[in-house]
Amino acid sequence: MGKEEKQCKMESDFVYDSLTGLYNLDTFKRCVAAFLENQEKSDKFALLYTDITHFERVNNLYGTGRADILLNDLAKAVSKIDFGLRLYCRSSADHFIALVDFTSKEKLKYDLEEFCRSFNGLALERFPEARPRLGIGASVIEERSDCIDDMVELADSARKNLHGSSTVSVAYFNPVDFGKYQRVKEIERDMGKALENGEFKVYLQPKYELETNKMVGAEALVRWIKEDGTMIYPDEFIPLFERNGFIRKLDFYMLEQVCAMFRRRLKAGKRCLPISINQSRVLLDSETYTTDVACVLNSYHTPPDLIELELTERIFSDSLSEMAEMMDELKRIGIKWSIDDFGTGYSSLNLLKKLPVDIIKIDKTFLDETETSDVSRIIIRKTVEMIQELDKMVVCEGVETEDQASYLKFIHCDISQGYLYAKPMPMEEFEKLVDEQEAVA
Ligand code: C2E
Ligand code: CA
Ligand code: CA
């Protein structure tokens, strides 16, 4: 290829999708934004977002060359849409986006279903083994003032509503998802500043020794307290932070805050109780994880036996031997490991056998049924017995009633945590409790 030809190709790649020759996503977005500016307010527009179910199967069974033919077929079909087509592009893989005008949502849905049916007939004929099926998510453009990225995001979210269904081929964007989408955007927009501003707070939920009823430690649980005083609970943002990677920063921030508290108290000659900190699965992907943890402890001069790291049982799907090695590294410096939500995963017993854990936290769901179910009582009793025989401590979490507590005491469970004793509380409140207990002792 000559120099000029190359330059020309680069310029064309900038505007067009090289496989289908349609606009690429960036060009499409620019064109849609400019187009909508000049339209009458009364005109109605929708964005369509395609998805081919089993497209991977086409790739795997027929090879990428043949799969590309299917994409070119779809490109052709999209460009020939005969109901209100205005602009269209291929955004990635099997995703094409089109802007159409329409008069009624019902009629548009009907046209789209017909479009899918006709395309599916052709695709099935060519790729019978893979059974590809076209689905389309449609979102009506309600606010012309929305930014184009949001519009595309909404159409994509409509597409996700199809959930790879084999019967539904067209799904409209639903306002409930819109609320969720906006909430996610808001959280992602605010999270960085919130961390800088100290809006993430360490709450501590005390743990009690059943035998003596004495407070023996606590679990750190994050709370996001916004400037206006509203509190967001971790269930709303932790899964999102695990997806977007922000959890790495947050979990280390929690560790640092706990270490800073220990430093402050130890300097003042005050007593410290061990604190457990939840560690997300995402953290363990980093090769420097163990050294990063050790560095934090070092920089705050934290005695490692005050730190316990909780890993939820739900994360253990991959290589247990690698996991064991990583855990051993931190165990060697004196940090303890606990398995959280024990009994909810698929290989609880395997974990007990293969991982160097010190503490097992039995999931709340087992406790919930102890009052009504003999089976649950037997399971919990025998589990506690087994864990203790393996020389590990047992914590029962989610203890809410006196009956549950006395049953746990009866079966010699070590430690208990739950609303019966105390809810998660701000750090200062917990520190006061520790000081009071010290004063009584
Ligand atoms: P988890 O680690 O299983 O924490 C226990 C959850 O049960 C906490 O919810 C706690 O407030 C709640 N709980 C405690 N006692 C009782 C009780 O008696 N009854 C009932 N119904 N619930 C009780 P929370 O604080 O909303 O945290 C939810 C989950 O979010 C945690 O579950 C943990 O998986 C995650 N999480 C919280 N903080 C962090 C964090 O800093 N980092 C990471 N990676 N995850 C966190
Ligand atoms: Ca936990
Ligand atoms: Ca738990």
Image: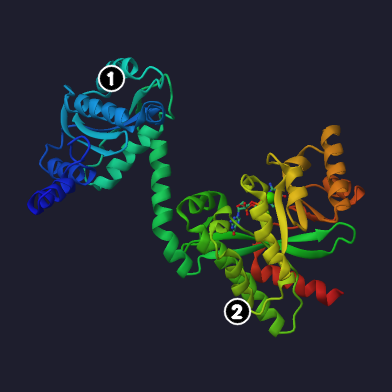
Q: Which mark is residue 140?
A: none
| Residue 2 in view in this figure | yes
| Residue 399 in view in this figure | no
Mark 1 sits near ligand 1, with its Cβ under 8 Å away: no
The percent position of residue 347, horizontal first and vertical second, equals 71, 41
The percent position of residue 170, horizontal first and vertical second, equals 34, 24
Residue in front for this viewpoint, 262 or 338 = 338
Label 2 environment density (alpha carbons within 10 Å; few <14, some 14–19, many ≥20): few
Which of the two labelled residues, at mark 2 and mark 1, occupies the earlier sequence position? 1
Distance between the Cα atoms at labels 2 and 1?
Answer: 62 Å
Task: Name the residue rendered at 84%, 64% in the picture.
Answer: 214
Amino acid type of the residue tagged 1 in the rendering: Phe
Q: Residue furthest front?
A: 1
Quadrant of the frame with the C terminus: bottom right
Q: Based on the displayed image, in which of its 4 quarters is residue 109 positioned?
A: top left
Q: Which mark is residue 119?
A: 1
Amino acid type of the residue tagged 2 in the rendering: Ser
Q: Is residue 175 left or right of residue 232?
A: left
Kindly check if marks 2 and 1 are in contact, taking CB atoms under 8 A apart as contact: no
Q: Based on the displayed image, in which of its 4 quarters is residue 160 positioned?
A: top left
Q: Is residue 8 above or below residue 140?
A: below
Label 1 environment density (alpha carbons within 10 Å; few <14, some 14–19, many ≥20): some
Residue in front for this viewpoint, 360 or 368 = 360
Element carrying mark 2 = helix
In this figure, which residue is indicated by the disc labeled 2? 299
Q: Is residue 237 left or right of residue 438?
A: left
Q: Based on the displayed image, in which of its 4 quarters is residue 162 positioned?
A: top left
Q: Residue furthest right?
A: 410
Task: Name the residue rendered at 16%, 21% in the picture.
Answer: 82
